[in-house]
Image (cartoon, rainbow, N blue to C red):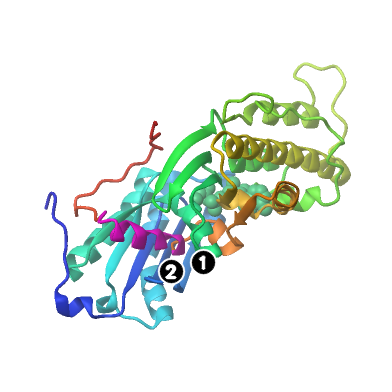
Amino acid sequence: MSGVVNTRSAEESACPEILLAIESSCDETAAAVVDSQGHVLSSVVASQDELHQRFGGVVPEIASRAHLSRVLPVIDEALRKSSHALEDLSAIAVMTEPGLVGSLLVGVTAAKTLAMVLGRPLIAVNHIHAHLYACRMTATRNIFPATGLVVSGGHTNLYDCRSAIDYELVGSTIDDAAGEAFDKAAALLGLPYPGGPWMQKMAVNGNPRAFNFPRSFLKDDRLAFSFSGLKTALRYTALGLPGAEEPAPELTPQRISDLAASFQEAVVDVLIGKCRQALSQFKRRTLCIGGGVAANVRLRERLLELQDESGIDVIIAPMALCTDNAAMGAIAWELLQAGQVAPLDVDVTPGLVRHSR
Ligand code: KG4
Ligand code: ZN
């Protein structure tokens, strides 16, 4: 099967152009039907949050097993909601990188099978690029070139986005991702998983200046992030220094709120600061933000302030396109147009590939 590329007959090409996109890179099983104008005809997301909650994070083996049982019903539902049948599809898109290997394999195997059986082109999508493309979908106009920030549970990456399909990774975290830091901080404060939304909720009643947490690399030109020092600072403030004679003050709801607000403010300060640096270093006037942490209300407020004061065009994907979904697989139309069709033996790439200049 190596190197096989599916093509369509002239007759088939007359069909309405719609594609099915499949996403299973982490803990959401998702499928969407999108037309060639970028209209989302249906988008179905089956979350696994309840399966991973008691472990305080995603358990890869549980995730891939859940994808296995959900992928076909999710595809069926996406097709049904779009009022289309499998035969109507012009192409099959699937996120092949990055992610958990077992999880990725489930979606990719389903996509390959459909592409082969239907005789349609298979398009391999980079999940992170798709998060940024969600901003292009939101704007419904060309937004490139731009600086892009993807902040999720697995990634905190800055990109120089030259076009809809040309993204250069220009900065990333050297340890935890921002969402992961939120999740770990929440677990430490006794809040449920996923922790980001809970930290945000507690922060509403807290003082963001109650604790002066570290903002790593903020005064450094390097486009790098680090959240492990912040996490440790939170631990010592919340639970006390190891071996300390005095116990830490009781974690009352007010103290948890102050800790959450101060933690959130530190993360947001760093994200905004690094976006400013990237915009300036790459001389871009547009900033697009995607990934689950982009749902954070405080981050959104600060991004709008940045827009007002600097005139930078800030495009934030709406909630449904921020967290993991398959609709952002609409980027596949751009890839298809550029002739980037994947062979049916395309492999998954679990790690993040740094494309150097
Ligand atoms: O993009 P996403 O849905 O999945 C990954 O690819 O990781 O992002 C999930 C992450 C989790 O870490 C979650 O805690 C975080 O996004 N998150 C938030 C908020 N909503 C989700 N973090 C901070 N504030 C939020 N409102
Ligand atoms: Zn994601």
Q: Is residue 76 above or below residue 153?
A: below
- Element marked by disc 2: loop
Left or right: 138 as drawn, with respect to 19: right
* Circle nearer the viewer, 1 or 2: 1
Callout 2 amino acid: Gly
Q: Circle 2 sits on which residue?
A: 38
Q: Residue at x 35, y 63 (%)?
A: 333
Disc number placed over residue 140 in the picture, else none: 1
- As drawn, 207 above or below 213: below
Residue 326 x %, y %: 44, 62
Question: In the rendered view, does 237 fall on the left or right side of 99?
Answer: right
- Observer able to see residue 99: no
Q: Secondary structure beneath disc 1? A: loop
Q: Is residue 230 above or below residue 73?
A: above
Rendered residue at 69%/25% (across/down): 219
Q: Amino acid at mark 1?
A: Thr
